[in-house]
Image: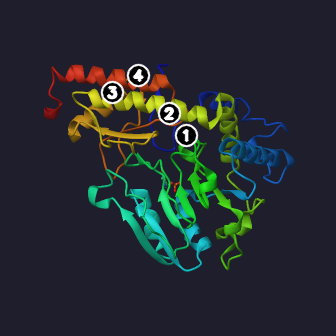
Amino acid sequence: MAVVYNFSAGPGVLPEPVLREVQAEFLSYKQGVSIVEMSHRSDTFGTIVEQLETRLRRLMHIPDDYAVLFLQGGATLQFSMVPMNLRETGRFAYLDSGIWSKKAIADAKHFGDVIVAGSSAASNYGTIPDWPEHIQDVDYLHVTLNNTIEGTRYTKLPDTDVPLVADVSSNILAEAIDVQRYGLLYAGAQKNIGPAGLTLVIIRRDLITERDLPSYLAYSKHVDTLLNTPSTFSLYVAERVLAWVETEGGVEEMERRNEKKSKLLYDALDTSPLFYALVSGKNRSLTNIPFTTGDDATDEAFRQFAETRGLIELGGHRSVGGLRASLYNAMPLEGVTRLIDVMHEFEQEGQDVSYKNV
Ligand SMILES: *Cc1c(COP(=O)(O)O)cnc(C)c1O
């Protein structure tokens, strides 16, 4: 079978050696039963969760005064759990940098007053808003560090005493994140860590207080324990993926590779006579690269052209259209060079055929 490269934004590509390992031990994991038949309270499974946390702490240099929580509900449930659990004054600041932050803002409004401290909505989120100069008297400042749909990212952080809360769903483990600068980080696992069904929350312990909330929704009920049955399969695969990241050289090495991969693709787009990147300048994402020919029909023709050559999931997000290549950790360099070759092939064919008339 020809090689397939999966450019999906999420659930995204996972390391092939991990998938093979999972396949090999799926019927019988240590005790002669499948991992998906095993109690989450068993010693065997307890070891997996412990290992997962240990690896994550090592890879991200997470200090002891931060708790790591393994939840469900995706990043989307964190849009609500964050304001529910961090609410003191009931005033929350948000940077409105993309469609995901817009959704986070909409959900936070159920729990207090949202101050939009900066927005790039007017430019259709083609850029990111600057950090606010002065921000105070709010419970936290929320930012989407990497805008998965629009392909922008923050690299610098503001100087502020307000706890920073970041949605890192699409850049966790893809680039170095200085955990100590944040009060809370959260991420759905399905972009860069493992299968869907697992959400990571990394929270400074002093921000966790007892709340009059339904048990699942309170961070305090998840600290150092599994409150209920987690998505056991997702936890198990995530642990194997983190082991792979460690073997490959850790987050620093992932970042180096992702910089190399994304630079290759951005350079190809910047010099292409047909395609161009939707984001320019220093805030280009390392992991999600939206691009277009400027014409819907030609974009669609290329998407199909690429698909028949084993390059799949290159369509843009359904809300914005166009094309998008997601280059998560498990996307090899060869996937990117292959994409660039296929772009050139398409450009070549376009000299004979006008796709605008297809
Ligand atoms: C994918 C994504 C989400 C939504 O995640 P779910 O796990 O599907 O809820 C939220 N924020 C960002 C930045 C994302 O990339």
Mark 2 in CB contact with mark 4 (< 8 angstroms): no
Mark 4 in CB contact with mark 1 (< 8 angstroms): no
- Neighbours of disc 1 within 10 Å: few (<14), some (14-19), many (20+): many
Instruction: Residue at 58%, 59% (x, y): give it.
Output: 73
Instruction: Residue at 57%, 42% (x, y): give it.
Output: 176
The residue that mark 1 highlights is 174
Spatial CA distance of label 3 from label 4 is 12 Å
The residue that mark 2 highlights is 258
- Neighbours of disc 4 within 10 Å: few (<14), some (14-19), many (20+): some
- Above or below, comparing residue 330 to residue 60 in the picture: above
Q: Amino acid at mark 2?
A: Asn
Q: Amino acid at mark 4?
A: Arg
Q: Which quadrant would residue 72 be assigned to in this image? A: bottom right
Image x and y of residue 24, in percent: 71, 29
Instruction: Residue at 60%, 52% (x, y): give it.
Output: 197
Mark closer to the chain start, 3 or 4: 3
Spatial CA distance of label 1 from label 3 is 21 Å
The residue tagged with tag 3: helix, strand or loop? helix
Circle 2 or circle 4, nearest the eye: 2
The residue tagged with tag 1: helix, strand or loop? loop
- Above or below, comparing residue 89 to residue 247 in the picture: below
The residue that mark 3 highlights is 268
Mark closer to the chain start, 1 or 3: 1
The residue that mark 4 highlights is 338
Question: In terms of depth relative to the viewer, which is nearer, 217 or 155?
Answer: 155
